[in-house]
Image: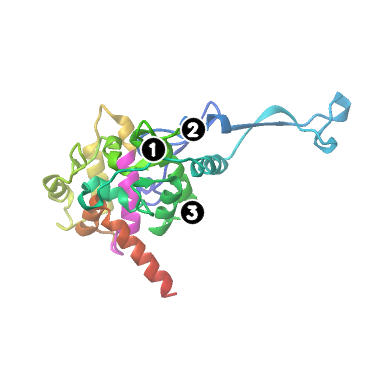
Amino acid sequence: MSASIINEPRTSTYYEDGLCSIASSSGSYLSRAMECYTFCEVHSHSHTSGEEGISGGKLVMAGRQRLPAAAVSALLLLWIFSCDHVEASIDFANMTALEKHVEFFDRDKDGIITASEIFEGYVAIGCDAAFARASAASISAGVGPITSPVEAPLPHLSIYIEYIHRAMHGSDTGAYDAKGRFVPEKFEEIFTKHAKVRPDALTSMEIEEMILANRDPLDPQSWGAPEGEWGLIYKLASDKQGFLHKDSARGIYDGSVFYMLEEQRTSSRSDM
């Protein structure tokens, strides 16, 4: 797998017409929620121009200056954290595999995943704070509106687990059906088709081969999501020999790999 996938799993930052946006796994952008924050207009006039400058106690807004991507993410997160939501209805005892996949990030187990919980979850599995912050902002902006019920208050940035199947993307392995249920036959195909060095594990090149084979040529917007998902899991869960084992790959689909990674991180920190 190329270094862009394995070594730096990330969301992509774009600057288009002054709108800073971080692409989410669903292909949506922060500009959905952040258009009004992407520019700050700062210009000071001298006393000779007849207007007071900054030293005179007056700030005249005129020229344009782009805010850094980190500042945009921080502004969005502050906004997201202040948002309210309606009560969720989720049967934790009978969740689909896809619901289990995201349930790890529901840190307070109320059926709703907020941006702060996504951030906490990413840090818990071993991601650095900057990556976790960007991921929380982009995922909330991209997936929240798709999974929020109509009665939820705007701006619909919290993720409701019961509706997570609405956010499914193309170019995937097919190991989830349309309702988010696990399809064992499709999961086994991952290894029968692509695991060539070892039958029970995948190398980075084999994962890249699988991602390319699953790409839907009619849906190029879905191509980035599998790269980010598999790239992150490979980086965090592969062994020292570079193999992502079958049980770890299976844990992606029911979310158990996230609990494993959190436990490993907690254990390694306690041993220090």
Secondary structure at numbered mark 2: helix
Which amino acid type is shown beneath numbered disc 2?
Ala
Residue 251 vertical position relative to residue 217 in the rendered view, above or below: below
Q: Position of residue 138 (x, y in %)?
A: 43, 40
* Residue topped by disc 2: 33
* Badge 2: residue crowd in 10 Å (few <14, some 14–19, many ≥20): some
The residue lying toward the viewer, choosing from 42 and 147, is: 147
| Residue 168 location, quadrant | top left
* Residue topped by disc 3: 129
* Badge 1: residue crowd in 10 Å (few <14, some 14–19, many ≥20): many
Q: Where is residue 117 in the image (x, y as percent from the top left)?
A: 42, 51
Which amino acid type is shown beneath numbered disc 1?
Gly
In this picture, which residue range is highlighted in magenta? 225-241
Secondary structure at numbered mark 3: helix
Q: Residue furthest right?
A: 48
Give the mark nearer the N terminus: 3 vs 2: 2
* Residue topped by disc 1: 144
Q: Does the magenta stretch include residue 236?
A: yes
Left or right position of 193 against 9: left
